[in-house]
Image: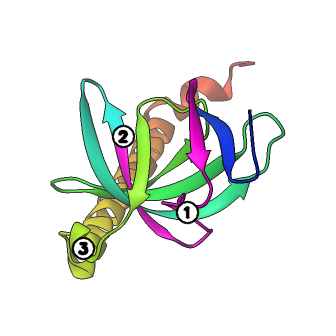
Amino acid sequence: METENKRIIEVNGIKMEIDLRTAKVIDNYKVGDYVKILKKEYNEYRSYIGNIIGFDNYKERPTVVIAYLKSEYSSASIEFAYYNSASEGIEITNLNEWDIPLKKSTILEQFQKEILKKEQEVAEMKNKAIIFEQLFGKYFENKQI
């Protein structure tokens, strides 16, 4: 039974009676906010820093879109998480100033290493294409394939 000062809400299947006179909002998020994301990967949870980049207002499952930084030993990448009422193995909370253990320069260096690695892979593929053309090109000239 709801009154002017009390309301019944349901969170993940648990019904609670809230006294609106003393209730307060714990977390307000908006696009552009930095958050910490706890994500289940295999059998463990890992924590990442993220930024809320969007809100998809689906009728059935409104979804918060989060870009998060996945920084590992020698590489860095930007991944995306989609957080809604059906999300499992993922939680978000406010980001504290001390939650960022890496420096900007370290992360940019990791990205630069990844760029160089990919450029080497592209150069290798171009070289393989040239070798293929030289070694096998004549074979395919007379074929209908």
142 vs 37, nearest the viewer: 37
In the image, which disc is placed on residue 109?
A: 3
User: Which residue occupies 79% across, 50% down?
Assistant: 57
User: Which residue occupies 60% across, 29% down?
Assistant: 86
Magenta span contains residue 26: yes
Tell me: 75 left or right of 25: left
134 vs 27, nearest the viewer: 27
> Which color mode does the image show?
rainbow
Q: Which residue is mark 2?
A: 39
Estimate the x, y position of residue 53 in percent, counting from the top left.
Answer: 60, 64
Of pointers 1 and 2, the one earlier in the residue sequence: 2
User: Which residue occupies 50% across, 58% down?
Assistant: 67
108 vs 36, nearest the viewer: 36
Estimate the x, y position of residue 120 in percent, counting from the top left.
Answer: 32, 57
SS at badge 1 = strand
The amino acid type of the residue labelled 2 equals Lys
Q: CA distance from mark 3 to mark 2?
A: 25 Å
Q: Quadrant of the C terminus?
A: top right
Rendering quarter of residue 34: bottom left
Q: Is residue 83 visible?
A: no
22 vs 93, nearest the viewer: 22
Question: Magenta residues, as a range?
Answer: 12-38
In the image, which disc is placed on residue 52?
A: 1
Q: Quadrant of the N terminus?
A: top right
Rendering quarter of residue 115: bottom left
Estimate the x, y position of residue 28 in percent, counting from the top left.
Answer: 56, 64
Q: Outermost residue, right direction?
A: 59
Of pointers 3 and 1, the one earlier in the residue sequence: 1
The amino acid type of the residue labelled 1 equals Ile
User: Which residue occupies 66% across, 47% down?
Assistant: 6
97 versus 42 height, above or below = below
